[in-house]
Structures are given as structure tokens and as C-alpha cells.
Image (cartoon, rainbow, N blue to C red):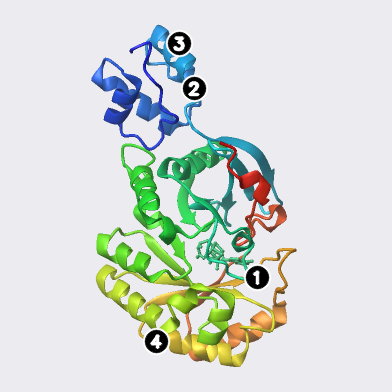
Amino acid sequence: MDEHKKMPKTLYGMKPNEILGALGLEKTFQGKQVYKWLVRGVSSFEEMTDLPKPLRFRLGEAMPRLASSEVVDEQTDSSGATKLAIQLIDGAVVECVLLTDKEDRKTACLSSQVGCAMGCTFCRTGTMGLVRNLQAFEIIEQFVHLRRIAPDTTHIVFMGMGEPMANFAEVIQAINYLHDPAGFDIGLRRITISTCGLIPGILQLAEINLPVKLAVSLVTADNAQRTELMPVNKAYPLEELKSALLHYQHVVGKRFTLEYVMLHNYNTGLQSARKLAAFIRGLDVIVNLIPWNPAAELDWETPDGKEIAAFTRELDLLGVPYTRRFSRGRGVNGACGQLAVPKNVCDSNL
Ligand code: SAH
Ligand code: SF4
């Protein structure tokens, strides 16, 4: 190792040969050794016990932390959801959540951006506006921090802050890294990208034919309502979205999910159910019903049990396949659409 070598800001996101070069290691196999330790979740060179002690010491002196970001807050609620606030290299803060379901399956809910430019009126992240895109290593590091809490994390969803299709290249780079069978080895079918319906991203995903799961936040199948709720619908209205989804389905051939955030007295009536049934005709989808998660600064309301039951009864009659998502993470404002960091915390201080 060259004593005067400039150290990288993180080792995450690098392949073994890149680690080798970045750290100026002399022996080729040491790149692989370091990579394996990163996957095991160590946080310092000192813990990499199969490297020679003097080398560990020198590396540790030159690079005390292996990641560029650090956890600045951790909260767990009664559903077992843990939300982390992670401070990035420029001072911006991003949130991510670890969710545990009934079968004890652990899912890392990751952010793709700090804030979001899409401005959906029911979403807390939308109120922040976009602060900046995350780089691939910053996405990967969220997973690394969450996995330290739950080493048996097997699934990833891009349902945290931000619109993954608006940061496509970095999200795909992070996915490829996390998928590496010699590394974190997360199966592609265990990774879900959720989008508000940015058509170019959906088409790009079809083009690269990466067999991750796709989820599309439909929220309503009524164009006027959708434009009111989601500004993205002006640029990419429902008919165009449907054509893109038909194309995606044709190319990828896998069933995907439509997310339907249920808003009290707004999109849960008979007409809404009928429009939804018409929209999904020809699509191999399952609709994921999500009762709106409250956010103090937003005016929407969560539908009650009766309202939801009436809506699902209609969906049953119309033959719409759906699942109901239990809102884990509400206790820490870590459920879907509840992630937000005050703007002053996000502003870069570099
Ligand atoms: N930008 C992407 C992914 C992040 S949002 C997208 O929009 O799909 C993740 C999910 O949370 C989306 O399905 C979105 O519709 C949903 N969501 C946003 N705000 C919500 C809220 N207040 N309650 C319930 N779900 C919400
Ligand atoms: Fe952005 Fe998704 Fe929230 Fe819309 S729902 S504002 S796209 S994070």
C-alpha cells in the first residue's frame, strides 16, 4: 500500500479489482478479501482479520470508516419497523426503513433520491421537493446500514424517498452490485422498483430486461383525479401509461403490481372500482391496496374499515385481483409516503 495514496470516500459499490486499485493493495486476492468483509458487514479494517495486521493498521489510519455515510438516528415502532436517518457525505439526510412481515421476512425499503420532484399531493416526501439524486454507493450504503440491524434481510423495495426512474442509472448500478452472487446475493426477483409512472423509465427497464419486480403507483384510474393527485399524469396520462405497461408486459412477461393508495371519500367508490377494473383489462397485474398513511401536513384522510370493505367487495365482484397491505412503520413515520426530512437538514453544507 502506497502511504500517500488518496483514499476513496467509500468502498461500497466497488468490485474486488476496483478495491484493489483504490486501496493500492499489493496482492490480487486481497481485493476479494476486503470485498467479502464488506459483505459480512464489518465497519473497520481492524475487523478484517485475514489481512496482515500492519496492513489493517495502515489502512485503518488512512480510512477510519469504510462507508461515506453514517446513521444519525434509529427508531423502531411496535410493528417492528425500524427507520434509519442516514447522513450523507455532503450533510444531506436520507431515510430508509427495515420492514418485517408476518412470515418474518425482512425487507429493506430504500430511497433513491433525497426528497422527490414529483409532487404527489398525498405523499410526505413530495412536500420536500427534490434535494438531489443519490449516487449508487449511497443507495447501497442504506442497505448496508439496515443489514447490520437484520443480517437476514432478503428483499429490497425502492419505496423510500424519491422516484427511482428519475435516477435510473444509479438505481440500476446499485441493484447490480447488491445482486452479485459473490457479494450480497439478493435475487433480482426479490427487488422491487416502484414508480409513479415515468414512462421512459418503464420502457428503459423493459429494454434492459432486468428481471426485477415492477410496481406502479396508479392511485386512481381516473385521468382527471390522477392529474389532480399526481402532476406526472399531465406528462404521462393513463392511456399512455397503459400502452407502456402493455409493452413492458409483452417484453418482460412477468406479472407486476399496481399500487392503489386509498384516500377517504375520493377513490374508493363504485365508479373508482369500475375505472380500475377497466384499466387493468389486458394487464397481468395484482393491485396492492394501501390505506393512506397519515401525514400531519397533508389534508387527506384514511378510509375506515367499512369503506375499505365496500371497495374490496366491488373489486371482488369485478374480478380485480388485489392484496391489502398492512401499513407497517406508521409508528415511526416510516410507512409508505411518510418519509421526509426537514429541508434545513437536507441542504448540503459543502
Ligand atoms: N416514487 C415511487 C416510490 C416511492 S413512493 C412511487 O411513487 O412509486 C412508495 C409508495 O408509497 C408508492 O406506491 C406511493 O404511491 C405510496 N405512498 C405515497 N404516499 C403515501 C401515503 N401517504 N400513504 C400510503 N402510501 C403512500
Ligand atoms: Fe415522489 Fe413517489 Fe412520493 Fe410521488 S409518491 S412524491 S413519486 S416519492
Is 129 on the left or on the right of 177, as rendered? right
| Image mark for residue 49 | none
What x and y, as percent, mark residue 230?
54, 74
What x and y, as percent, mark residue 209?
27, 61
Task: Name the residue rendered at 59%, 83% in the picture.
Answer: 312
Mark 1, secondary structure of its residue: loop
Q: Estimate how packed mark 3 is, as few (under 14), some (14 to 19) or many (20 or more) residues with alpha carbons within 10 Å.
A: some
Q: Amino acid at mark 3?
A: Phe
Q: Eyeballing the image, is 209 above or below 152? A: below
Q: Eyeballing the image, is 55 above or below 261? A: above
Q: Amino acid at mark 4?
A: Arg
Q: Amino acid at mark 1?
A: Trp
Mark 4, secondary structure of its residue: loop
Q: Which residue is mark 2?
A: 44
Q: Which residue is mark 1?
A: 292
- Decide if residue 114 is in sight here: no
Foreground tag (3 vs 4) = 3
Q: Estimate how packed mark 2 is, as few (under 14), some (14 to 19) or many (20 or more) residues with alpha carbons within 10 Å.
A: some
Q: Estimate how packed mark 1 is, as few (under 14), some (14 to 19) or many (20 or more) residues with alpha carbons within 10 Å.
A: many
Q: Eyeballing the image, is 270 above or below 312? A: below
Q: Which residue is mark 4?
A: 281
Q: Of callouts 3 and 4, which one flags the residue occurring earlier in the amino acid sequence?
A: 3
Q: Which residue is mark 3?
A: 57
- Discs 2, 4 touching: Cβ within 8 Å: no
